[in-house]
Image (cartoon, helix red, strand yellow):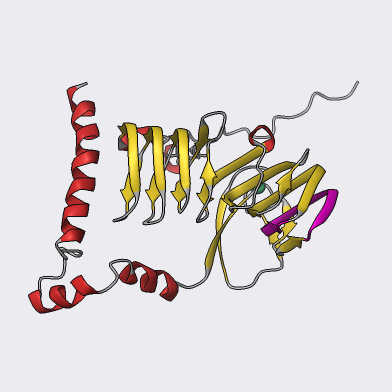
Amino acid sequence: MASKKTKVVDGYTAIRAAQEAARHGRGDPLRPDPETSKEKSTADPKAGARIGRSVMPSKREVICPECGATSSIVGKVDLWVCTQCRHRMKLQDLKIEAGDWNNEIEVGGTVTILPGAKMTGGRITANDVVLQGEMAGVEIRACHKLTIHKEAKPDWVRLKTLDMELGPGVNLTPGKPIEGRHLGLHGKFSGNAVLQGTLTIYADGDFSGQLKAAGLQVEEGGGFRAQLDVKPENAPPPPKPKARAPAKPNPRLRPPPPKNQNPPRPKPK
Ligand SMILES: [Zn+2]
């Protein structure tokens, strides 16, 4: 019990320390050169992270809508086949234009619902969903990530996602606790979030309410007022190793075969 309490305090301490460090230009403790540090202090503290991200090869995490297995895709793939359950889907990206829409689609790419699109029914299953339009009856499942833009009108009852990101200018007060893995905020969130992963509050983000999560990151400039329960133990336990195939008997230990392997059949009468 005592250790849990310590960890909650540690979350606060870490944020304070990070913010202090950023304020004093000590952005990177791994960079001992004081000259470099001074130059860095005038630069955008986020520049490093941004460059780091852009250098990364375009690798996407595709999550199977059938079995939930995760696979990494690098480069262009048209047809994706789940390695676990053999479920197939196209990895194409789709855009849904302004106007009424009522249909059923499943893709492993990104579905962008543009401003002015009114989703009156049907179902969308996609790896990533960018919501700028209105949910008016549609069911949306983002197997990986849902991004909510300022113009979006989400319907929390008909929405499922693993990760969620709020775009700049969003002011979200969901009527129910948000559950998922990671939550990233460029906009404002007021409410209750229960995360198996990390809450990231970017410089233009703001969180207020209750947070239960496994990790927490707050960029300098981000707003944060919350009742906290942040500890690594809030992450789900690692998947259990697959049940081993029944061990084959060691041939050396096998008892010698019976001498008479083919006993004579009873003679037909
Ligand atoms: Zn699968």
Residue drawn at point x = 38 percent, y = 50 percent: 201
Judge whether 53 appears above or below 13 on screen: below
Judge whether 51 appears above or below 85 on screen: below
- Dividing the picture into quadrants, the one containing residue 123 is top right
Q: How many marks?
A: 0
Judge whether 113 appears above or below 179 on screen: below
Residue 85 colored magenta?
Answer: no
- Dividing the picture into quadrants, the one containing residue 7 is top left
- Dividing the picture into quadrants, the one containing residue 99 is bottom right
Residue drawn at point x = 63 percent, y = 47 percent: 142
Residue drawn at point x = 66 percent, y = 69 percent: 77
* Most frequent secondary structure within the magenta stretch: strand
Q: Please state the extent of the stretch shown in magenta in the rendering.
A: 97-115
Q: The C terminus is located in which quarter?
A: top right
Q: Is residue 202 left or right of residue 136?
A: left
Q: The N terminus is located in which quarter?
A: top left
Q: Position of residue 206 (x, y in %)?
A: 40, 46
Residue drawn at point x = 44 percent, y = 73 percent: 54
Q: Position of residue 192 (x, y in %)?
A: 46, 31
**27 or 32: nearer the viewer:** 27
Q: Position of residue 42 (x, y in %)?
A: 21, 74
Q: Residue furthest right?
A: 269
**199 or 116: nearer the viewer:** 116
Q: Position of residue 253 (x, y in %)?
A: 42, 37
